[in-house]
Image (cartoon, rainbow, N blue to C red):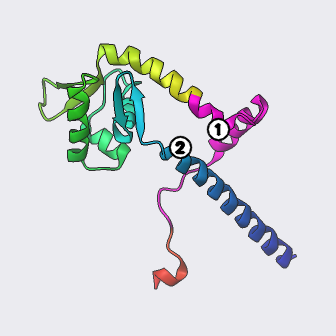
């Protein structure tokens, strides 16, 4: 019985490894896109991600929040934001109580343009799932919703010594 459980666990681990490799391939191909057409402008991946992050936030986002989301330094975020401000896609607004807190928001014209861009982006990305039926997509969403993302990789016994 012990060997049967050990074998079942080994097979599960192999299946999970295959699943992670497949998901990694999908993500890698999606991340291979480096330029995102936004009207007459071309956005870099970080600029594109900033727009997606701040668009749903009525109060905007802080540089600190964006740095955490992008996993970069606040100074790197500031450089990305400077370009987006130049392109008139985002605005900066300081809080009256604390001038160190700056809220980054989409500009009015950028909000409208972003809605169109987002719809087109997801339409293009949906091609990756064209072989799945609606029921399979719904099932995939439920299954992915059950996955708990790790926040770190645990050390093995050899590395603990």
Would you place residue 7 above or below residue 51 in this image? below
Taking 66 as reference, is 12 left or right? right
Check disc 2 and report its element: helix, strand or loop.
Answer: helix
Using the numbered discs, state the Cα–Cα distance from disc 2 to disc 1 in whole angstroms. Answer: 9 Å
Residue 74 in view (yes/no): yes
The residue that disc 1 covers is: 128
Residue drawn at 14 percent across, 35 percent down = 100
Along the line of sight, the residue nearer the viewer: 38 or 136: 38
> What range is drawn magenta here?
124-153
* Residue 30: mark: 2
**Looking at the image, is mark 2 or mark 1 earlier in the sequence?**
2
Which quarter of the rendering shows the N terminus?
bottom right
Is 155 rendered above or below residue 134?
A: below
> Against 160, is 138 above or below?
above
Write down the quadrant of residue 112 in the picture. Answer: top left
Tell me, yes or no, whether the highlighted magenta stretch contains residue 148.
yes
Where is residue 133 drawn, in percent x and y? 78, 32
Q: Which SS type dominates the magenta stretch?
A: helix
């Amino acid at each position: 019985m012990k060997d049967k459980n050990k074998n079942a666990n080994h097979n599960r681990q192999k299946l999970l490894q295959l699943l992670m490799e497949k998901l990694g391939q999908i993500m890698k191909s999606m991340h291979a896109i480096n330029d995102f057409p936004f009207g007459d402008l071309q956005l870099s991946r970080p600029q594109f991600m900033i727009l997606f992050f701040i668009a749903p936030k009525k109060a905007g986002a802080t540089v600190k929040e964006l740095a955490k989301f992008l996993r970069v330094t606040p100074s790197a975020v500031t450089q990305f934001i400077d370009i987006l401000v130049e392109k008139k896609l985002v605005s900066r607004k300081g809080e009256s109580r604390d001038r160190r807190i700056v809220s980054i928001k989409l500009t009015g014209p950028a909000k409208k343009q972003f809605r169109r861009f987002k719809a087109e982006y997801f339409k293009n990305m949906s091609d990756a799932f064209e072989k799945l039926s609606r029921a399979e997509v719904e099932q995939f969403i439920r299954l992915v919703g059950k996955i708990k993302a790790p926040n770190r990789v645990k050390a093995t016994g050899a590395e603990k010594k």
